[in-house]
Image (cartoon, rainbow, N blue to C red):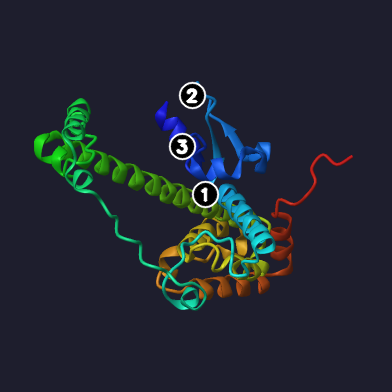
């Protein structure tokens, strides 16, 4: 079930607990942009990532416009990127350093109850939750399984990411192969409606679309039908380029007797049968 959900929601994010969605609000999206999660009971859902970012930027710009009008802050702007300290931001904004926290001795060292509560929380979570005043690496040192689990999570996340992009590459390769096979079949059908006298136009149309060796295969499967090409031997022409082969076939077709050319014209499958 989780695999199905991941495949369906590859380009979407969950709305439950999402701060961006909570800030924008569900009213900013059309019913087509929201997807109900049928696998959960908490009325969760998913929203398209592109639609969410667009709605977030629009609301940020609206808030910035309101602040410019209400507070007179002309420098206020709605943007997704954080304010930096270089380039254009350096001339518009001034980033002040964060003030250092002033802690009392008891707050700095922690009192006995805080230590006991932190230790209890660490034990209850099997090392997963490590809060102050305990050092941040206490869970790793006291519970060796914690770094192992974290490493497994990272490995699984990396594997899922690789599988996602691998599937995308496989689908793209399958799409290109299907498009090529379609062009190959169309070239076969197109050649069936040509005589040796007009085969040059067929090559001009499909050269660069279908590989040359495939065009040559199609040609040799087609040329055996026509009397004017009966002298063409595949072994004799195997070292010659395709354009030379097609040129000689066209010359042979146009230089054939009138009766042969008329017969070959009637061999093209473009005649109506059982006409009333």
**Residue 70: x and y, percent?**
68, 60
Exactly how many numbered labels are in the figure?
Answer: 3
Mark 3 or 1: in front is 3
Q: Secondary structure at mark 3?
A: helix
User: Is disc 3 surrounded by few (<14), some (14 to 19) or many (20+) residues within 10 Å?
Assistant: few
Comes first in the chain, label 2 or label 3: 3
**Residue 187: x and y, percent?**
59, 57
Q: Nearer the viewer, residue 199 or 253?
A: 199
Q: Nearer the viewer, residue 82 or 42?
A: 82
Q: Which residue is mark 3?
A: 7
What's the mark number on residue 178? 1
Is residue 233 visible in the rendered structure shown here?
no
- Residues at marks 3 and 1, CA–CA distance in whole angstroms: 22 Å
Q: Which residue is mark 2?
A: 39
User: Is disc 1 surrounded by few (<14), some (14 to 19) or many (20+) residues within 10 Å?
Assistant: few
Comes first in the chain, label 3 or label 1: 3
**Residue 276: x and y, percent?**
89, 39
- Residues at marks 1 and 2, CA–CA distance in whole angstroms: 34 Å
């Amino acid at each position: 079930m989780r695999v199905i959900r991941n495949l369906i929601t590859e380009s979407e994010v969950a709305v439950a607990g999402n701060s961006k969605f909570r800030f924008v609000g569900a009213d900013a999206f059309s019913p087509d942009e929201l997807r109900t999660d049928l696998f959960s009971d908490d009325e969760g859902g998913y929203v398209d990532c592109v639609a969410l970012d667009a709605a977030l930027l629009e609301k940020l710009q609206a808030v910035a416009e309101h602040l410019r009008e209400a507070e007179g802050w002309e420098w206020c702007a709605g943007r997704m990127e954080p304010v930096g300290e270089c380039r254009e931001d350096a001339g518009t904004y001034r980033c002040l350093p964060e003030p250092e926290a002033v802690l009392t001795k008891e707050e700095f060292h922690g009192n006995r109850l805080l230590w006991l509560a932190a230790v209890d929380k660490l034990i209850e979570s099997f090392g997963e939750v490590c809060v102050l005043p305990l050092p941040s690496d206490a869970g790793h040192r006291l519970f060796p399984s914690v770094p192992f689990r974290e490493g497994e999570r990272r490995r699984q996340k990396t594997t899922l990411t690789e599988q996602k992009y691998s599937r995308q590459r496989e689908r793209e390769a399958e799409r290109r192969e299907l498009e090529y096979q379609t062009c190959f079949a169309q070239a076969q059908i197109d050649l069936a409606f040509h005589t040796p006298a007009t085969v040059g136009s067929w090559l001009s149309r499909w050269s660069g679309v279908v590989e040359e060796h495939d065009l040559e295969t199609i040609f040799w499967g087609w040329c055996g039908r026509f009397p004017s090409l009966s002298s063409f031997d595949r072994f004799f022409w195997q070292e010659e380029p395709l354009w030379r082969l097609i040129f000689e076939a066209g010359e042979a077709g146009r230089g054939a007797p009138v009766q042969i050319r008329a017969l070959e014209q009637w061999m093209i499958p473009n005649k109506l049968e059982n006409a009333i």
